[in-house]
Image (tube, helix red, strand yellow):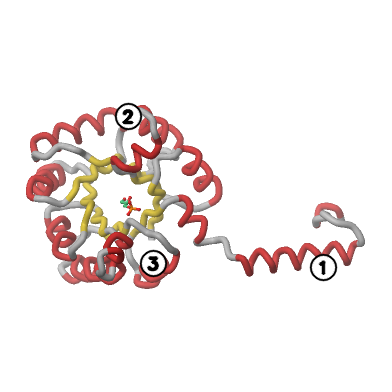
Amino acid sequence: MLMLIDSADLKGIRRIYDMFPVDGVTTNPTILKNAGQSPMEQLKKIRAFIPHGAQLHVQTLSSTAEGILKEAEHLLMELGDNTYIKIPVCNEGVKAMKLLSSRGINVTATAIYTAMQGFIAGKAGAKFVAPYVNRLDNIGFDGVEVAKNIHDMLTCHGLETKVLAASFKNTQQVLSLCEYGIGSITASPDVLEQLVNHQITSLAIQDFNKDFSDLVGAPDKTMLDF
Ligand code: G3P
């Protein structure tokens, strides 16, 4: 399962890249607003920081397919290869997905709330389709189930498109999709950190350290000291 960082905050991106095996960064206009910087400058900083070849997903804003195509060209020119053009699913968006994909440009369909939207975007050639798991939960649907349905439909119809599940608020949502074999997820630095940290693990580490200190009769010793 690919794991991406859903953030434009360089500090958070650096923190996660330092520690975890991640595959790239996803952004959207709200995420860029939260970073509070000029959008293209911030995206260029992120591109410069992440490893060569890592994915960077950037959303278009145009309401027509023609406009989306122009934006895509601009984004690829400014941010280079392995930039995924994120396009919200709507009529003009799907039209743009079809055109861009036929030209070999990587497309990520976003703002997906139904399984059928995910399927149509996949059929239009999107490499990734991004159902909004937690937002679905918040409006009374089961976001994990929608993501699984899309995964199943894409698989059983032989489409290469992968689910890029997005909008997570807790680790259980990520776990359920990982167990199911979902292709990829993107989550905030906070949620990604919670996938590793556990209070009981911290207590176990404390106990091990204390036992070692008792054994050697001094605190803060490691194997290097012996
Ligand atoms: O990538 C889409 C995602 O950022 C939406 O997440 O947390 O705003 O529901 P959220």
- Name which residue lies at 20% across and 65% down: 154
Task: Give me the disc on residue 102.
Answer: none
Q: Pinpoint residue 45: horizontal percent, then vertical percent.
A: 41, 31
Viewer-proximal residue, 86 or 124? Answer: 86
- Name which residue lies at 25% across and 33% down: 76
Q: CA distance from mark 1 to mark 2?
A: 52 Å
Q: Pinpoint residue 178: horizontal percent, then vertical percent.
A: 39, 67
Mark closer to the chain start, 3 or 2: 2
Q: CA distance from mark 3 to mark 2?
A: 31 Å
Q: Pinpoint residue 4: horizontal percent, then vertical percent.
A: 39, 51
Q: Amino acid at mark 2?
A: Met
Q: Secondary structure at mark 2?
A: helix
Q: Amino acid at mark 1?
A: Asp
Mark closer to the chain start, 3 or 1: 3
Question: Which residue does the numbered mark 2 point to in the structure image?
Answer: 40
Viewer-proximal residue, 17 or 52? Answer: 17
Residue lying at the far right of the rendered structure: 217
Q: Secondary structure at mark 3?
A: helix
Mark 3 and mark 2 in contact? Answer it, CB < 8 Å. Answer: no
Q: CA distance from mark 3 to mark 1?
A: 36 Å
Task: Give me the disc on residue 173.
Answer: 3
Residue 73 vertical position relative to residue 14 in the rendered view, above or below: above
Q: Secondary structure at mark 1?
A: helix
Which quadrant holds the C terminus? bottom right
Number of residues whose C-alpha sits closer than 10 Å to that of mark 2, classed few (under 14), some (14–19) or many (20 or more) = few
Residue 69 vertical position relative to residue 183 in the rendered view, above or below: above
Residue 83 vertical position relative to residue 215 in the rendered view, above or below: above
- Name which residue lies at 31% across and 62% down: 133
Mark toward the viewer: 3 or 1? 3
Which quadrant holds the N terminus? bottom left
Mark 3 and mark 1 in contact? Answer it, CB < 8 Å. Answer: no
Task: Give me the disc on residue 211.
Answer: 1
